[in-house]
Image (cartoon, rainbow, N blue to C red):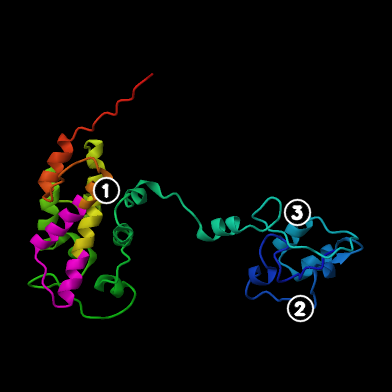
Amino acid sequence: MGSSLFWFVNWTRLGALYLNTPDDFYIDESVNNVTDVMHTGAWDADKLTNILPEEYAAHIIDNIKPPGEHQLLDIPYWCLETGGNFSVKSAWEYLRQRKDTGTTYIKMWVKGLPFKISFFMWKVWKAKLPLDDHMKKMGYAMPSRCWCCVQPGEETLQHLFFTSFAVKKVWSYFLMHAGIKIEGLSMHQAIVKCWTLRVISRLQTIFQALPAIIMWELWRRRNSYKHGEEVTIRRVIYHVSTTIQSLVRLRKPAVANIPQNWPDILQIMEQYTPKLKITKVL
């Protein structure tokens, strides 16, 4: 029957008219309900044209059927469902604005790798870490220093995770065994190289997880230095190798005596031959 509030309810599917009209547009507050712009069950075109911008008035007249002489109160209609009934699922899909994740974000999540490491990899990729260069972009003027270098420079994402002297030694140690040279590569390019490296399927998971594990251990090293604890590059390499060893043990439980040394892990995975299951047919 047109009992909805004219200005504040989304009865036109254009949103609340009070919020959608231009800021300098005069709001006629004498109009309260939709019935106030109707006459004998039809739209009062002259009144709509007077109180609304021309395009809004035309939309109502051309696209919305007036309720007529009905005496039933208006009922809410959920526009995201064809039946008009509210559902949590449709509200969730609308609010989160889901987009195509693409190959990049799929590669960040490795089954068996601790969630905190995969999530940290996403933060690095999106440059969401509270580093000095990020804080500067947010408008905070502050001194900056890298905690991991003997002669510290400015702390930036690229410097901390890829371009500093010590960090390059970590990347080179792990990537040289895969034939990847980091010279001339950016951090993101090196990561993608690991993700797209053509190796046997048993090694794909290892190289997919490798950048995230390296980033995680470099972050731990940075935080340790910041709080007064020295961590050597050899120690970082050891922790990365140990995490990879644990991942292989979880993903390939049939592989016996998994070594802790990175080159040995690659060698044993290349030489591993899965045992065939023999099924008796009666």
Give above or below for 227 relative to 262.
Answer: below
Dot placed on the residue nearer the N-terminal end, 3 or 1: 3
Q: Which residues are magenta?
A: 219-245
In this view, the residue farthest toward the front is 282
* 27 within the magenta span: no
Q: Label 1: which residue?
A: 250
Q: Amino acid at mark 2?
A: Glu
Label at residue 29: 2
Q: Main secondary structure of the magenta part?
A: helix
| Residue on which the image places disc 3 | 63
Residue at mark 2 to residue at mark 3: CA–CA distance: 24 Å
Of tags 3 and 1, the one toward the viewer is 1
Q: Earlier in the sequence, mark 2 or mark 3?
A: 2
Mark whose residue sits in front, 2 or 1: 1
Residue 224 part of the magenta segment: yes
Marks 3 and 1: CB-CB under 8 Å? no
On residue 199, the disc is none
